[in-house]
Amino acid sequence: MMVTAKRKVLLVEDNESVCEAVSEMLAMAGYEVKALDRGEGAVEMVKDFAPDILLTDLKLPGMDGIEVVRRVKETDPNVACIVITGYGTVESAVDAMKAGAFTYLRKPYEKDELLVILDKAYEVHSLTKENRSLRREMKRRSIDAILGTSEAIQNIRDIIEKVADTDSTVLILGESGTGKELVARALHYQSSRSDKPFVPINCGAIPEDLLESELFGYEKGAFTGAIATKIGRIEAADGGTVFLDEIGDMSPALQVKILRVLQEKEFERIGGRKTIQVDIRVVAATNQDLEKAVAERRFREDLFYRLNVIPIVLPPLRERPEDVTLLADHFVKTISERKGKKITGFAPEVLAVFENYDWPGNVRELENLIERLVVLKGSGRIGLKDLPERMLAGRSGGQLKPPPAGELTAARAPFTIPPEGVDFNALVDNFERELILTALRRVNGVKKKAADFLRLNRTTLIEKMKRKGLIDEKETVES
């Protein structure tokens, strides 16, 4: 069996004739071999030679083969280790595996048997090395994905760096579309749990009667249709991170069970009697005001305090306009590459519109908009004529910017009118739009409450929102 590329083997064997025979055999098979007759020099040789595989005898003068494996794995976890001995016992095999050995081979052995094992060991080495490389890349990308130069985003990145490698529960708060799952993934991949599963669960997207079985699993026969035991997502995340998205939508009954998981790190499957222990870190997120939900008895106070150990508040995009251009440039580049399009960027006036737009859907709205623009434009630079009409409301010949988003009231008048005049209708239209958005923000998007806040009939508010592109024309039934 000849290998196609030079694979490095460090051989530790105190029997000179055996060492020479094995070295020659491996060299003829295409391996690059370095040999030692004692284990004490193995660590330094690993640093200098960087072997793919360690092949060591168990019985050595001084340091034995198991200790060699242990120290080599501490120096370079990627090295695949094989222990060979003529004194094989179950106990020594177990000890070798605990030390990190890939396998255990007894003497005497056939040449082909050794070469097959070396080949498999190299595959394991390559996969291990690749996985570690991927995890490093995931770690880098997870924090790089939280884009922004604003002070708020820099503070969030600092918090992630400080708390990622702890087991403290984190509660991520923010409007829909602000990137709460990106923060959760960064917390996971920046932690020592990064080689274990990251399991996201959207508590608002899964029907209540199915959410419990998704979380905790069930035993065979627990209910009609349970024809086999199913492992829940919490159990599947053992050793890793569970991300409970939109936890504010979770029913009170399930809140009690999640509280137990947080407190005791244990649960039972549906229909089961066995208590299952899990080692997980919990990260939760919501776009709701949980303190208000606690006051209204819609959310358990004890669970809130268990979740709110380390809160991270994601600001809406309208509060960090300095990040919009950076995000837009990132999305247009990545989406153009993914879609095979040749978009070269944006006209300056487009970026000005982006920075002054309110972005009610936050970063998700920006990303979706740019995907649409990239697909429809195909190539060249995105200009004003490519933008949807609703984004251009309030512009006056490209000169007058709409008022900034914020808590707008009648007290803002009178306006300062520039010498060249204003587009009255566009300015009034934009002011109405800002009033509607401000009211919706105050009442968490509930249109009936927003109408009451603005002293309007609900149907009048809906019609205004439709005309201003803030709601689907077909939408008639709303909260």
Image (cartoon, rainbow, N blue to C red):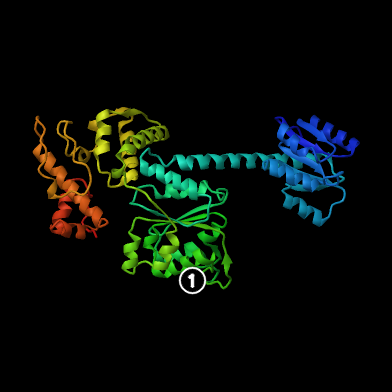
Observer-nearest of 106 and 331: 331
> How many marks on residues?
1
How far across and down, in percent of the image, does residue 160 sit? 46, 47
The C terminus - image quarter: bottom left
How far across and down, in percent of the image, does residue 163 sit? 49, 50
How far across and down, in percent of the image, does residue 347 sit? 28, 28
Residue at 20% from the left image edge and 38% from the top image edge: 389
Residue at 15% from the left image edge and 45% from the top image edge: 431
The N terminus - image quarter: top right
Q: 431 above or below 263? A: above
Query: Visible in this render: residue 459?
Result: yes
Which of the 4 quarters of the picture holds residue 351?
top left
How busy is the neighbourhood of tag 1: few (under 14 within 10 Å), some, or many (20 plus)?
A: few
Q: 266 above or below 73? A: below
The amino acid beneath tag 1 is: Thr
Which of the 4 quarters of the picture holds residue 206?
bottom left
Q: Which residue is label 1 attached to?
A: 224
Observer-nearest of 280 and 110: 280
Left or right: where does residue 152 sit relative to residue 241?
A: left
Residue at 13% from the left image edge and 40% from the top image edge: 427
Observer-nearest of 379 and 76: 76
Element carrying mark 1:
loop
Query: Visible in this render: residue 473?
Result: no
Left or right: where does residue 124 sit relative to residue 65?
A: left
Residue at 27% from the left image edge and 47% from the top image edge: 360
How far across and down, in percent of the image, does residue 328 sit? 34, 36
